Image: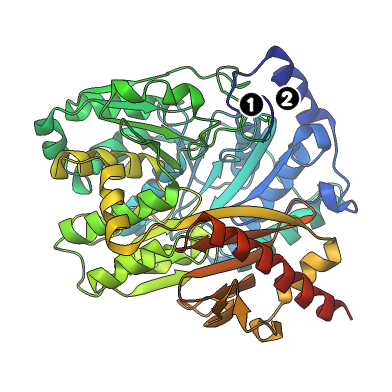
Amino acid sequence: MHERAGRPAAESDLVDVEGLVRAYYEKQPDASIPEQRVVFGTAGHRGSSLNTSFNEHHILATTQAIVDYRTARGITGPLFIGADTHALSAPAQTTALDVLVGNRVRVFVDEFDDYVPTPALSHAILKWNNDPETRGEGEADGIVITPSHNPPQDGGFKYNPPHGGPADSEATTWIANRANELIAGGGGAVNQAEPSGVETYDFRGNYVEDLANIIDFDAIKRSGIRIGADPLGGASVHYWAAIRDHYDLDLTVVNARVDPTWSFMTLDWDGKIRMDPSSASAMASVLEHRGDYDILTGNDADADRHGIVTPDDGLMNPNHYLAVAIEYLFAHRPEWRPDAAVGKTLVSSSMIDRVAASLGRRLWEVPVGFKWFVPGLIDGSVGFGGEESAGASFLRFDGSVWTTDKDGILLCLLASEIRAVTGKSPSELYGSLVERFGDPAYERTDAAASAAQKADLGRLDGDAISATELAGEPITAKLSHAPGNDAAIGGVKVTTENAWFAARPSGTEDVYKIYAESFEGPEHLKAVQAAAKQIVDAALASAGE
């Protein structure tokens, strides 16, 4: 924990926006240098112009690669494009439009030149593709320009194919490889033209009006609860005012400022400015208002993550809120399929497992990455999909798809519905879950690992783990593939009756991440974490021999 974590950002913490944008245009990446190549993580390509990992040539090449991918896959409809409030997002959108128009792709930008949250873009793609009349003009897809909650100096570029959610690894690998070929070749195969002739789409109006089909606003309004919403300087800033006005709610936009330096933020746990609504350090200034509202919420820069603050408990742990949301939704959405499953990533809390079992619902446990929930949300076989990192989405009242990407605005609104309908805050409801199922201790830590060790961990098979016991309990499973869909998890997960850990290599640092949880309390959690490191290190040593 940094000594200034949770304290306001100082002048010395702020990025030079002018220098950042200048570097975007001036620095040219070298595809032979790994750190300067286009690399898609679980959501998209991210980097900074300052270290030549997110520059004009990256976006020229990546956009052309997306055009080539569309052609190869027969995608002939329009492409929806939007950007968040990061300083590099606007120039990246201009660059992308040059390429899209140069390739004669039909493009929709925001009607009001507004920022576009990730869920609003996913919603737009699905609305187009689910309407037989518009779909007849060809399937639509989209690009959202955002590095999510990353610091102000970062940029991000994400492709959402016609299913509306994050592209799968087949698509991102194809696009990244093609983009790096174009960069290495000097960019001569990139087609550009002035961004004229693009069409407009009301992302905000369409999204806000349709919320009535997934959130019980009548209950919220009748209850008279006071709601506070802080966009944290992100793309949802004008959406919250529109929601308030459209549904006549007692809702206050706590901070409507947009500043590409995020000078109003408090520093995150490591001393960086990071717009993470699940971090108490990043949300410190928001938490000062916890007593002013019945429900207080925060979103990150592209509004795909949520933070829930209650007067009685402050900022909720994302795992706690997911468990409460799941129990509430499956009890208050009678039109959902009776066999609709509870979806969670394998590093999310086992409290969710116990809630799902009590509901008589199938648990669908998948690897890290929201892309795994897409098919189930589309066909209604998964009612709710959530990640421990405060990202989730769920079905409409009628059991049909809402978004196939994470929707932080939606999860924040659900907290108000829960409070209005039950008369209790989500944190109070979590307390009742603890009384019924136990009180788990959960934490994520990092352990040092070389590039070779990270590669070994990513390929590690559960059978390579020789241990039979974890922190005094017999091991019940050693997993290298997710139970829900048998997809490789890029690491391992080890479980006992009352505890588990999962280890995965970091994609950006020389560490591997250890997620661990124990229903036996904090001291047992420490024992689990220590044993996890010993088990993984032993397995890596054997793999390296």
The quarter in which the N terminus is drawn is top right
Give the x, y percent position of residue 164: 44, 55
Protein image colouring: rainbow
Give the x, y percent position of residue 134: 33, 53
Question: Which disc is residue 244 wearing?
Answer: none
Q: Quick check: can you spot residue 212? A: yes
Which residue position holds label 2? 21
| Whether label 1 touches label 2, CB < 8 Å | yes
Picture quadrant where residue 527 is located: bottom right
The quarter in which the C terminus is drawn is bottom right
Q: Residue at x 68, y 30 (%)?
A: 271
Which residue position holds label 1? 87
Which secondary structure lies at badge 1?
Answer: loop
Give the x, y percent position of residue 347: 52, 62
- Report the front residue among 97 and 150: 150
Picture quadrant where residue 288 is located: top left
Residue 98, relative to residue 123: is it above or below?
A: above
Q: Residues within 10 Å of mark 1 (few under 14, many from 20)?
A: many
Which amino acid type is marked by label 1?
Ala
Give the x, y percent position of residue 470: 60, 74
Which amino acid type is marked by label 2?
Val
Q: Residue at x 56, y 18 (%)?
A: 259
Picture quadrant where residue 363 is located: bottom left
